[in-house]
Image: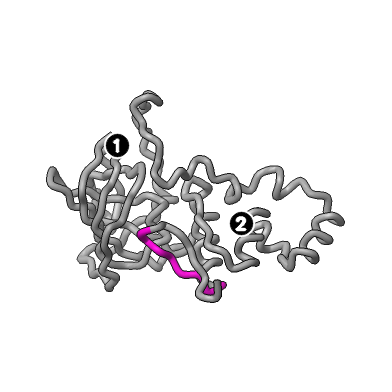
Amino acid sequence: MIKCQGTLRIKKIRQSRNGAFCIADLATDFGEFKVKDPMLDQFEEGEYQGTVWISEIYMSQYISYGKAVTELRARLHDLQVDSEDRKPVRSNEHSEPDPIDEVPTPQVPAKASQKPAKRTNWADMKGNRLGKEATSVPEQDAGKADTQAGQSTGDIELFGQELATQINNRQAVKLDPTVDRVLFRKQTAGLKARGYTFDSKQQTWTHPGA
């Protein structure tokens, strides 16, 4: 695990069959790396400075316009933003493949004792996982619960019961980027459609009407 100060230059890619996604160039004192982690999909374009925890540095390759592109990537364990400058980011690259469509690069196994707990504690967030609690409720009971809580079935299917309740009450919510990446993008788009905005420093979605 590497902890360092860095600058993330995040760019949003909008042409994707799986929905818009973000990639970033990470500049540190010991090198520059590409970052294509799911957590970036919440961010807007711009430059973000702060502390990053890098769990792995590895080589990756993909084909673009008939050429093989090799890049040095960093996989982030966590991110703490200290300052941001939201602005459009231009890129000279013709295209970027969707990370969902790439062949996964095997992760280097690490001992649990060497891996510090995440500051944002994503692994302990259960409300964003569509587990049995959100899917095993009998249909007639689910309809009654939705009516009482003022929630729609679609919200529960997308976010899970706990997050759907928080969103219905316009409370601040945190998404879990370790869920399926397509689902994560749909959740991000769903929050934006409901008037939520992303606070990069807290990595929390907030509603102006809260």
Secondary structure beneath disc 2?
A: helix
Q: Quadrant of residue 104?
A: top left
Mark 2 = which residue? 163
Q: Mark 1 is on which residue type? A: Glu
Crowdedness of circle 1 by 10 Å Cα count: few (<14), some, many (20+)?
some
Residue 201's x, y, as percent? Answer: 35, 59
Residue found at the far front of this picture: 210
Is 204 situated above or below 209?
A: above
Residue 156's x, y, as percent? Answer: 68, 58
Verify CB contact (< 8 Å) between mark 2 and mark 1. no
Q: Is residue 153 magenta?
A: no
Comparing marks 2 and 1, which lies closer to the viewer?
2
Crowdedness of circle 2 by 10 Å Cα count: few (<14), some, many (20+)?
many
Q: Main secondary structure of the magenta part?
A: loop
Secondary structure beneath disc 1?
A: strand
Q: In the image, what residue occupies the spot 35% across and 45% down?
A: 78
Mark 1 = which residue? 56
* Magenta range: 194-201
Q: Mark 2 is on which residue type? A: Leu
Q: Is residue 56 left or right of residue 195?
A: left
Is 19 situated above or below 33?
A: below
Please tell me which residue lies in front, 12 or 44.
44
Q: In the image, what residue occupies the spot 77% across and 62% down?
A: 146
Please tell me which residue lies in front, 16 or 138.
138
Q: Quadrant of residue 165?
A: bottom right
Which quadrant is home to the C terminus? bottom right
Residue 44's x, y, as percent? Answer: 36, 67
Q: Is residue 201 left or right of residue 26?
A: right
Q: In the image, what residue occupies the spot 52% across and 41% down?
A: 124
Which quadrant is home to the N terminus? top left
Task: Give the mark nearest the N terminus, 2 or 1.
Answer: 1
Residue 34's x, y, as percent? Answer: 25, 50
